[in-house]
Image (cartoon, grey):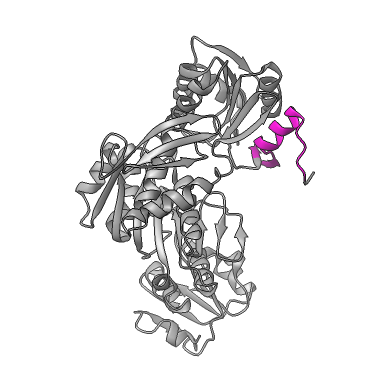
Amino acid sequence: MKAKELFDGICGRGIGNWEDVEVRGLSDDSRRVKEGYAFFCRRGESFDGHAYAEDALRRKASLIVAEKPLPLSVPQLVVPSVLSAAQLALRRFYNHADAYLFKVGVTGTNGKTTVSSIVRHGFEALGYPFGLIGTVNYFDGKRWIKPKNTTPGLFQLWEIMGAMRDNGLYGFSVEVSSHALKQRRIGDVRFDVSVFTNLSRDHLDYHKSMEDYFSSKLLLFREHTEGFCVLNGDDNWGRRIASEVRQPVVFYGIESGDIRGRIVDASLSGMVIEVDGMRARTLLLGEHNLYNILAAYSVFAVWGMGKEFLKEALPEFQPVKGRLERIEKDGITVFVDYAHTPDALFSVLKVLKPLASRRLITVFGCGGDRDKGKRPEMGRVASLFSDVVVVTSDNPRSEDPGKIIEDILQGIEGVECVVIPDRRSAIFEALSMAERGDVILVAGKGHEDYQIVGDRVIHFDDVEVVKEALGIVDEAG
């Protein structure tokens, strides 16, 4: 596409013969630039894209889009706002791909991955090819992509949407993080349905206050939703969102809501639930997952497909990797879960405690260089439900693992506690003390297959370590 066509109508000043440049791709990351690309010098919270224009030129960028003239021998377009220019250019370059896709955005502290995955599974099961963008995977209709961020950057988002449209998908569900919203990573994309799960303490190292955290989440509904807002009616923050938007709202909940549900029966292998008077089986466990199911059900219910979703899709949905992922041998049941906030850990332990016929053993740690205030809270939550707590490391990053553990221990009381900083050894110890009827929760990392220690990223997968400790050999192995 010629630059003149790509940037038609955008206010700016050209330098050099920029209008006739053939643009083969767009990027705001100089490392992803290829020959013939237009490089956008976008400013972020901790970087200035103008500093990387020379690197983009070395990689044979054919055009630089910037907010100031640069001393480079390459055609340039100087614009008042690189972000505004990028939003329009991306829409044109990818031929308005978003308009061809049914888009479901999911935000909240906990449950985003499960809700977006259930939504994708539901559409697929009902005959609508569907994509996914989230913490564990991106799926564009042909490729499963391992993500770097829960929500991709603006340019990768459009690249994925373009591939989804080209691959014949009906739509996609996406986890929309508070970071992505605050950093304007989704540009001017608007969703047909936006879902709010809940809000509790997390990311306060970034947001500094719950009010700022909430305000970032609110952007999804105020600025990026053109259809229904599906909100947790049992969550005060969800009720507050409803008071601040003009779009139609559907509340779901257990205590209140337009759509309500309850757990009829539960065991370690799943639940029977009732939603809108209809019963269904699910492999998922717990009240928090009932909320996740209700959120996903609401997406289908507003389009008249709720019954089909419950009967045809939900029973076959497998738990997402690292979300109460169950491993069992010789009467010992282990769950690996991503719970890394006080609220998430509370929800998971509350589910498992009554299902354990003997003891509940909890293994967890907290990440380094992150919100320190939640560490003793996590310890208090673990003490409430566990018979034994094994405190270990998560991703210590640049912090001393021992100091992180000290912070956690401030909240632990009235329960047997073992401290083993090495996570692999901690998991092995928890399983060595386990007996038939015990339930072990390994919390905090879930789907992650790495551990960050200092400046090193090492391979570490909780599920793999659990299976090794239990002597389980995968068929592939």
- Residue 95 occupies which quadrant of the picture? bottom left
Give how far across and how far down residue 46 sits, in percent. 47, 52
In the rendered image, is residue 176 in sight?
no
Q: Position of residue 330 (x, y in %)?
A: 70, 24
Please tell me which residue is depicted at 45% across the width and 17% down the height of the picture: 384
- The number of numbered discs placed on residues in the rendered structure image is 0
x, y percentage for residue 203? 43, 39
Q: Residue at x 34, y 83 (%)?
A: 9
Asked if residue 262 is positioned above or below residue 278 in the image, the reply reads above
Residue 328 or 5: which is nearer the viewer? 328
Q: Quadrant of the C terminus?
A: top right
Answer left or right for 36 relative to 464: left
Magenta stretch: includes residue 467:
yes
Side of 211 relative to 336 (left or right): left
| Residue 476 spot, x, y in % from top left | 77, 46
* Residue 318 shown left or right of residue 430 in the figure: left
Viewer-nearest residue: 162 or 185:
162
Nearest the eye: 351 or 410: 351
Residue lying farthest right?
477
* Front residue (pair 402, 214): 214
In this view, the residue farthest toward the top is 414
Q: Magenta segment, which residues?
A: 451-475
Image quadrant in which you'd find residue 460: top right
Instruction: Inspect the magenta stretch and tell me whether residue 304 lies in it.
Output: no
Q: Residue at x 40, y 55 (%)?
A: 105
Question: 191 above or below 119?
Answer: below
Q: Residue, x 40% and y 58% (percent of image)?
A: 104
Residue 432 visible (yes or no):
yes
